[in-house]
């Protein structure tokens, strides 16, 4: 079978062999505490507990009332010790709930629910109450994704099994070890959407196709879904390129997969969905890969959400501190370099990579030589250097015209740049400026509307 692909992209060294033979092992944080971000996808939540409260594993501890809110649950049983701002991925400070374990095995799971006999609204409510978000990094609430606007006809559910980031292998291991749950979760989503399922699997993991095909056949879903091999190329895992490779459909600029009749889900998300119905289990733990040249024992672990990375060192993760120069939350292409390992594993944390100097490729920026490598490589068909130049000049509006907000921050441009220009960093800063401007405009509009309403009421 010929693997499908898209135009552009790169072929970085994969380093999958470091951990893809390592089974997922469940571990508990060494300090017996978890630091759980109050919000891990969707609209900002508020704590439902206070310091001193005793909570049970699976109990809801943070939520909001909006459609985009997605609740957060205790991943261990114990006592709430602190509610404070803590370091999280992207080196931001965010509200977190710190729970100290009481060594109890108590749980507060929901009752199991048959996804094929309950009504649609009940199923969506179960998904929301389980706190399930996309586990590939974006952390978009699943109950929202599976409830698209009435004018969006969903024809395909694409499961992102590409795992194109170097080093990361937790999805690969999940498909090997929990193929039954992967297929069950897909079937549930197909039932809810009426779509057809396509599992996009990179051909460097083609051996897994036989495992998934067998499970699909055994469960009687051969007419409902199939595995599509896609070419091993970065950033194949991006939603736009999954759709392009598997279906030949272009997602328009500033549009979502739903606008192309698609919903996209991560492998881990399908397993969490199956557990939410079959076990009544909220999303309170996740698998992730720990790898990189500075790791003496690369591995795949399953940890409670909120586990500090520092709590995994030196056991079970052994780090060669002398060779370590960079810690990345996520993969090396789209992840965030962290100032410390004292940050928690969140629902969207697929891995932590510890890089040596050779791997990190720490170079000083040089002058652009106008070679055009970034343009040829960009799968989004943008001109990265023009965006970078306008941002450097402070011309954010011009950068937007060149496609600033269409950039998916995959890092291909920076990877091939002979001058080692940090284009993605500029883009992220530029996007933050745009978002701040939009927030200010919304605030001004809201203040003006409130003023007009007040003045109207006083007449």
Image (cartoon, rainbow, N blue to C red):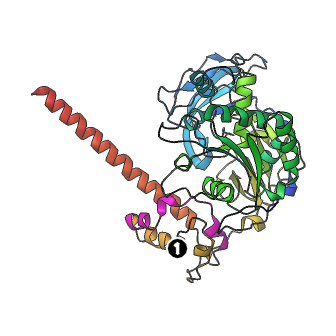
Residue at image coords 88%, 42%:
23
Of 153 and 444, the residue lying toward us? 153
Instruction: Report the residue at 61% width, 75% height from top.
Output: 376
SS class of the residue under badge 1?
Answer: helix
Q: Is 399 contained in the magenta span? A: yes
Residue at figure coordinates x 58%, y 21% from the top left = 51
Q: Nearer the viewer, residue 136 or 292?
A: 136
The residue that appears at 20% across and 32% down in the rendered structure is 453
Residue in the foreground of this view, choosing between 315 and 334? 334
Residue, far left: 459
| Foreground of the two, 369 or 255 | 255
On the rendered structure, is 401 left or right of 26? left
Image location of residue 265, percent across then percent down:
66, 43
Residue 380, quarter of the rendered image: bottom right
Q: Is residue 46 magenta?
A: no
**Residue 367, position in %: x, y?**
56, 80
The residue pinned by badge 1 equals: 385
The answer to whether residue 66 is above or below residue 165 is above
Q: Quadrant of the C terminus?
A: top left
For the stretch drawn in magenta, the main secondary structure is helix
In the image: residue 288, left or right of residue 367: right
Question: Can see residue 343?
Answer: no
Q: Determine crowd level at label 1: few under 14, some 14-19, many 20+ residues with C-alpha closer than 10 A.
A: many
Q: Quadrant of the N terminus?
A: bottom right
Q: Does residue 215 appear left or right of residue 304 in this picture?
A: right
The residue segment tinted magenta is 397-417
Q: x and y percent of residue 362 in the render?
A: 69, 68
**Residue 203 appears in the rendering:** yes
In x, y percent, where is residue 246? 68, 55
Question: Relative to 434, does residue 48 appear above or below in the rendering?
Answer: above
């Amino acid at each position: 079978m010929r693997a499908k692909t898209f135009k552009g992209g790169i072929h970085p060294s994969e380093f999958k062999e470091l951990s893809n033979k390592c089974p997922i092992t469940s571990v508990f944080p060494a300090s017996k505490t978890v630091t759980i971000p109050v919000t891990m996808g969707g609209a900002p939540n508020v704590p439902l507990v206070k310091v001193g409260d005793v909570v049970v594993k699976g109990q809801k501890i943070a939520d909001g009332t909006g459609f985009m809110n997605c609740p957060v649950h205790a991943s261990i049983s114990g006592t709430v010790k602190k509610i404070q701002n803590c370091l999280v991925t992207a080196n931001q400070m965010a509200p977190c709930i710190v729970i100290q374990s009481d060594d109890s095995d108590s749980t507060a799971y929901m009752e199991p629910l048959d996804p094929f006999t309950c009504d649609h609204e009940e199923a969506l409510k179960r998904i929301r109450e389980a706190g399930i978000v996309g586990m590939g990094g974006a952390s978009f609430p699943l109950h929202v994704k599976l409830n698209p606007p009435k004018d969006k006809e969903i024809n395909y559910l694409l499961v992102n099994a590409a795992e194109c980031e170097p080093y990361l292998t937790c999805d690969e291991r999940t498909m090997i070890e929990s193929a039954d749950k992967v297929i069950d979760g897909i079937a549930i989503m197909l039932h809810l959407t009426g779509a057809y399922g396509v599992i996009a699997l990179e051909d460097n993991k083609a051996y897994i196709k036989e495992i998934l095909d067998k499970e699909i056949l055994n469960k009687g879903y051969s007419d409902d879904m199939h595995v599509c091999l896609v070419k091993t190329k970065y950033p194949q895992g991006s939603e736009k390129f999954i759709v392009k490779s598997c279906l030949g459909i272009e997602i328009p600029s500033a549009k979502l997969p739903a606008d192309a009749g698609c919903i996209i889900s991560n492998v881990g998300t399908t397993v969490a969905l199956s557990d939410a119905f079959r076990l009544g289990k909220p999303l309170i733990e996740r698998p992730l890969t720990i790898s990189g040249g500075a790791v003496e024992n690369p591995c795949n672990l399953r940890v409670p959400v909120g586990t500090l990375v520092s709590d995994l060192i030196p056991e079970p993760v052994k780090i060669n501190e002398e060779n370590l120069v960079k810690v990345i939350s996520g993969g090396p292409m789209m992840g965030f370099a962290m100032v410390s390992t004292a940050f928690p594993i969140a629902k969207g944390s697929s891995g932590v990579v510890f890089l040596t100097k050779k791997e990190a490729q720490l170079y000083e920026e040089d002058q652009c030589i106008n070679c055009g490598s970034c343009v040829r490589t960009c799968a989004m068909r943008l001109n990265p250097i023009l965006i970078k130049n306008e941002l450097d000049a402070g011309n954010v509006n011009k950068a937007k015209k060149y496609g600033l907000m269409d950039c998916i921050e995959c890092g291909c441009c920076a990877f091939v740049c002979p001058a080692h220009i940090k284009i993605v960093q500029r883009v992220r800063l530029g996007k933050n400026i745009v978002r701040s401007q939009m927030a200010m405009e919304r605030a001004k509009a809201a203040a003006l509307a409130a003023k007009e309403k007040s003045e109207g009421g006083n007449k």
